[in-house]
Image: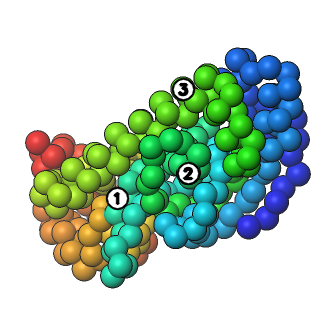
Amino acid sequence: MNCITLDSGDLDFARECFGFYDKLSQSEISTLERAITRLRFPKGATLRSRDADCLGVLLVREGVLRAYIASDDGREVTLYRLGAGEVCILSASCVLNNINFDVSIEADSDVDVLKIGLGAFDSLVKNNVWVENFSYKNAIERFGDVMWAVEQVMFMRFDKRLAIFLLDESGRSIDGEIRATHEQIAKYVGSAREVVSRMLKSFESQGLLEVARGSIKVRDRDGLRKLTA
């Protein structure tokens, strides 16, 4: 982790992304901006583990964060991912009443985040209803993502789950190529690497994909969509 000096662009970015900014008093703005730090993490770095203390509110400046839960035997289920301009409130869930959610957060790529310290955020939540509303609204949206992830793992056939993931991921990239290892995909979809490898091989034999080392190219999107029906 590296600390980066804040500049005016970072504060402008925060003003754009935090919807409550224009509802703050001047003293609250000063409190907030003094509490913002910019941090840089390399890909794979753990920002928060389930046994760690609250981290603070995170606003993604650049890169992608992955929120996940892990079992005692090391199996992981990805709950959601956050990109530039998105806010992670659950990393500060300890200051939100009636929300106690153990979630781990890691850098899914090299990532820069703007962090609001817990003391300042706690004060704003307690004294400004707009900040409180923003926080709970964001938390509820993330719980929606969590429930979707749990529903997929518990009730959805694995081939359907993997097809949805491949369609979503290929749609994110400019060239439609998914650059991820089988181990990484297993973490995203909440399965074992061996299961992912077998299913990818099956999809490739059907002409749906072209699988290479560290990358996957979707060849038949319509065929994948039929698996998701």
Q: Which amino acid is tagged 2?
A: Cys
| Distance CA(mark 2)–CA(mark 3) | 16 Å
Going from the N terminus, do you reach mark 2 or mark 3 first?
2
Q: As drawn, is 228 to the left or to the right of 187?
A: left
Label 1: which residue? 217
Dot 2 lies on which element?
A: helix
Q: Quadrant of residue 106?
A: bottom right
Q: Which residue is mark 3?
A: 133
Q: Left or right of 121: which side holds 25?
A: right
> Is disc 1 surrounded by few (<14), some (14 to 19) or many (20+) residues within 10 Å?
some
Q: Position of residue 110 (x, y in %)?
A: 64, 61
Q: Secondary structure at mark 1?
A: strand
Would residue 20 appear left or right of 147 to someone viewing this image? right
Display coloring:
rainbow
Residue occupying the point 78% across, 51% down: 38
Contact, CB < 8 Å: mark 1 with mark 2?
Answer: no
Q: Amino acid at mark 1?
A: Lys
Residue depicted at 44% across the width and 54% down the height: 101
Quick check: 191 above or below 121? Answer: below
Tag 3: residue type?
A: Asn
Of badges 1 and 2, nearer the viewer stands 2
Answer with left or right where residue 154 lies relative to residue 173. Answer: left
Q: Which mark is residue 94?
A: 2
* Quadrant assignment for the C terminus: top left
